[in-house]
Structure formats: structure tokens, C-alpha cells
Amino acid sequence: MGHLAGKEEIIKQLRERIDKNPIGLPEHPSIYEILSILFTEKEAELGAKFPLGVVSIEEIQKAVGKDKDELEEVLKGMMKKGLVVRSTKDGQPRYLLSPAFVGFFEFTFMRTNESLPMKRLAELMHTYKNTPEFIREFFSPGTTRGRVYAYTDALPPVKSEVLSFYEAAEYIKRAGRGSLSKCYCRHEAWHLGKNCSAPIEDICMSLGNASDFVVEQGFGRRATVSELLDTLKKGEDFGLVHIGDNVLDQTSFICNCCGCCCGFLQGITQHHLKHAVTTTQFIARVDHEECNGCGECETHCQIHAIRMEGDYPVVDEEYCLGCGVCAHFCPSGAIKMRERQKKVIPPKTYKELMVRLMKEKGRL
């Protein structure tokens, strides 16, 4: 009993440590069971003392007081589960205790893992993500964790360098390499018997340096730029919304999201939060003279921001993401993506995004 009580206390300390992240981990019975499944006692002990931010192994050693060889062995096991993320700076490895979101919740369902009780984890994560505590934490007003990236074929033909920052394909080309993984949201939904008909396999992308870790640890497979662009097109054929990091600089991921399963879009479709994800610089406008009243736009909008009123569609401008799905499927070309009057300017880098989130939540 002492051993069990000891791990229970360490798991509580681990949750408290993760709760200090820019996106925290509010207390709830389900999160303790999730952490107990994913973390061994040694891993939880290390995680509870893990320094904030991206750190060297020497900094981790100083914080936890462990031998370097022992530390590296524990870190290796944690990386395999997505509990720690490794990157490189000046040729030296750097480590980050993975946040829950976007982090080890997603890594858990980016592949099939027979050593874990996947159905139970899906049930627990579904429960946790629908608690008022989580909703307040993840979808708090202000800076959002993710933003929408536009369909290329829906944008105005004359583009500026600034507007290219809202185009999904441009980020793939800039990254130069990437990886393809399962859609973790639809994979989780599959374990609950609730997934839709959109693809699960090889549909969500990691880009650049982030993809190196994903491939190295077996969360996805290497993909060329050409293959990634083909996957982007595949997502568009299904009418999925492109969502990635809320940054102007290089995004680490682009997911192809449905309104029913996606954790970001559920903030809108289930919780009716207008600020769940940052929109593009564009908004959908309908030309009544060109519109034939077919209703394709209403059918394909993932967040139900378009509805038919009489012969014409009406766009709910408070919810419109500017994703371009409706324009992509409009057979008459009546829907055009126009620039918003109010400019949407994301943080420049991932670090700036994290600092903003920390400041807004009073953690910095």
C-alpha cells in the first residue's frame, strides 16, 4: 500500500507541475487516472521536478539530482510515449516536458499502441476535455493555441507576402520536410465508436524540426513536400479545416480537422465559443447574383457558420473561420474570400505564443 500511496502523491505533484505550463492541467479525477496510466513512477517523479521550458540534461540533473546515465534512460522511455520532447540547439540535445495539450494527449493517439489501454484512455480523455475546468483553461479568452490556415484555391488570385502567412501550402513548402500521422482526434473518437467518415490514417502533418522527433519516435512516417501537399489536397477534398500553431513563423503541425471530432473545433461546435481558434485574415462573402442557391456551402461548413435563408446562404461573421471550405465547394463561384476589416495578427514565434499565454494567465 505504501508503494501505491507513494505513486499517488507523485502523480499529484506531476499534475501540479504540468499545470504551470502555458496551457495547464486543471484538477479532476479523470486526469489522475490518465497520468497514472501514461507515467511510470520513475517518469512521474522526474516529470514532477522537471524544469520549465526547454532545458539541457545538465539543467534536469541539477533539478532532480539523478545520475546522467539513469536520467537518459528514463528520458528515452518518456520520449517514446511523447511525455518528453527532444530538440537540438547548437548540436546539443534539449528537452521539454510535454504539455498535455498540444502534447501527450495527442501523441498517445498518433499511433496504435497495444501496450496501453487505448479505449480506456479515450474514455478518460473525452471526459476530461469536456469538464468545465479544462474548457476554461484551454479556451480561455485572449490568445489561442491554434489558428486556421486557408485553402489556397479559395484566396484572391493576387497575393501579397503578408497574405501568404495565412496559406497552409506555403508553410509546407517553407518547412522543406515533414511527417504524416494518424489524426489523433478521429482515432480517439474511433475507440469510442464516434468517429466520422473523414480519414484517420496519414492525414495530420508535422513540419520541419518537429517532424524529426515524430519520425524518430515512431509517431509518424517521413513524407516529402510533394506528398504533404497531396495530403493537404486530400483534406480539402473532404472539406476539412487546416489548423496549426497560432504563429506567423514556421508552424510545427497542420491538422486536417472536422467539426465533430477535432478538439479545437469542438470548442465552437459543442461549446459555442467564438474564440476557440484564431481565424484567418479572410471572411466568406456571398455574391447573390452568382449564387444558385444549391446549399453546398451550408452542407460543407464544419462549424455550421453558414445557413440557407430562403434562396441564399447567410454567413455568421462572428463564427466564420475564413478557412475557405465553402468557397472551395461553391459550384458557381458565388462565395469569395475577402479580407477582414479587423486585422488578425498571430504571435511571430512559438516562444512568443507561449509567453503571451503565460502572461494572460498570470503565470509569468
Image (spheres, grey):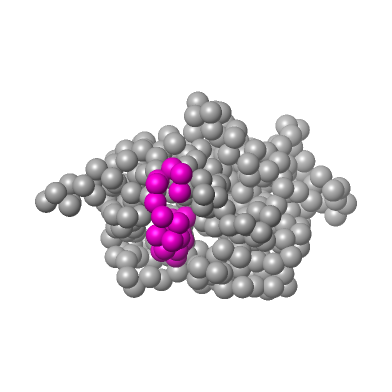
Residue 73 location (% of width, % of height): 42, 63
The residue most toward the left is 1
Picture quarter containing residue 233?
bottom right
Residue 213 location (% of width, % of height): 56, 63
Q: Nearer the viewer, residue 113 or 327?
A: 113
| Residue 64 inside the magenta-drawn segment | yes
Which residue is found at the position 28% from the left and 45% from the top? 10
Range of residues picked out in magenta: 61-84
Residue 113 location (% of width, % of height): 38, 70
The residue most toward the top is 362
Which residue is found at the position 86% from the left and 48% from the top? 160
Q: Nearer the viewer, residue 27 or 336?
A: 27
Which residue is found at the position 51% from the left and 49% from the top? 58
Residue 242 location (% of width, % of height): 62, 56
| Residue 77 inside the magenta-drawn segment | yes
Q: Is residue 171 visible?
A: yes
Q: Nearer the viewer, residue 63 or 161?
A: 63
